[in-house]
Image (spheres, rainbow, N blue to C red):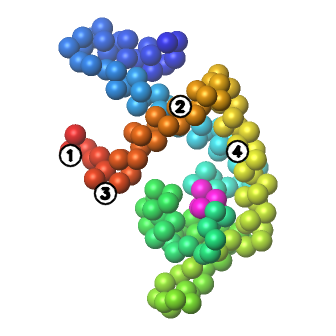
């Protein structure tokens, strides 16, 4: 294929014919696509002053039927606790969310969208979906479904309790 990852894997096949680089052709493309889409998403958010991780926090709250705890947002957004705390503080200062003591347990914090936060997510989400759809235009609807199914099969065990780590193949 005529993409960067195809060129890189061809170079590795030439330099190290003893190695199977087929995994690089899949994982490398997934990672490269994620990086490139991350850049495009950042560009679409630039006028709002939001970063992609901040938009992910707001989106997680928008999908929730109730407030979420910071630890839930940390898991959902694959962030560190410190990064989540920093994002929540910035988004709260911007008036996009509130943090209040939980009614279930006063030691916990509930994070909720404000009306402004909800409106911002509702305004930005259609543009995000448009950009994602544009990236997938080389694929038919059936191919998109097939790709989504295949990626879910690979991703599911990675997210589970026996998730993959660098120390265990």
Image point (60%, 62%), residue name: 60
Mark nearer the viewer, 2 or 4? 2
Which label belongs to residue 110? Answer: none
Mark nearer the viewer, 3 or 2? 2
The residue that disc 2 covers is 146
Label 4: how many residues lie within 10 Å, few (<14), some (14-19) or many (20+)? some
The residue that disc 4 covers is 128
Q: Looking at the image, is mark 4 or mark 3 earlier in the sequence?
A: 4
Mark 1 vs 4: CB contact within 8 A = no
**Up-down relation of residue 102 to residue 139 (above or below):** below
The residue that disc 3 covers is 161
Which label belongs to residue 167? Answer: 1
Residue 45 shown left or right of residue 81 in the figure = right
**Label 1: element kind:** loop
Specify start and end residues of the magenta stretch as a single range.
56-60
Image point (65%, 29%), residue name: 141
Q: Is residue 151 visible?
A: yes
Q: Looking at the image, is mark 3 or mark 2 earlier in the sequence?
A: 2
The quarter of the displayed image where residue 112 is located: bottom right
- Choose between 69 and 47: the one closer to the eye: 69
Q: Looking at the image, is mark 1 or mark 3 earlier in the sequence?
A: 3
Mark nearer the viewer, 1 or 2? 2
Residue 80 shown left or right of residue 86 in the figure = left
Name the chief secondary structure element in magenta. Answer: helix
The quarter of the displayed image where residue 145 is located: top right
- Choose between 151 and 72: the one closer to the eye: 151
List x then y, in percent, for residue 14: 30, 8
Task: Let me know if residue 127 is in the magenta part.
Answer: no
């Amino acid at each position: 294929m005529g993409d960067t990852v195809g060129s890189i894997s061809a170079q590795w096949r030439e330099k190290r014919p003893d190695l199977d680089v087929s995994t690089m052709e899949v994982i490398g493309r997934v990672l490269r696509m994620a990086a490139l889409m991350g850049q495009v998403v950042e560009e679409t958010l630039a006028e709002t002053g939001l970063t992609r991780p901040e938009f992910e926090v707001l989106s997680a709250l928008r999908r929730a039927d109730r407030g979420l705890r910071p630890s839930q947002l940390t898991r959902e957004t694959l962030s560190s606790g410190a990064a989540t705390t920093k994002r929540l503080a910035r988004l709260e200062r911007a008036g996009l969310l509130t943090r209040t003591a939980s009614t279930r347990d006063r030691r916990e914090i509930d994070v909720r969208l404000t009306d402004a936060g909800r409106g911002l997510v509702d305004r930005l989400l259609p543009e995000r979906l448009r950009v994602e759809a544009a990236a997938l235009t080389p694929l038919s609807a059936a191919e998109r479904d097939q790709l989504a199914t295949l990626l879910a099969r690979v991703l599911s065990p990675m997210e589970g309790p026996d998730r993959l780590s660098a120390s265990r193949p």
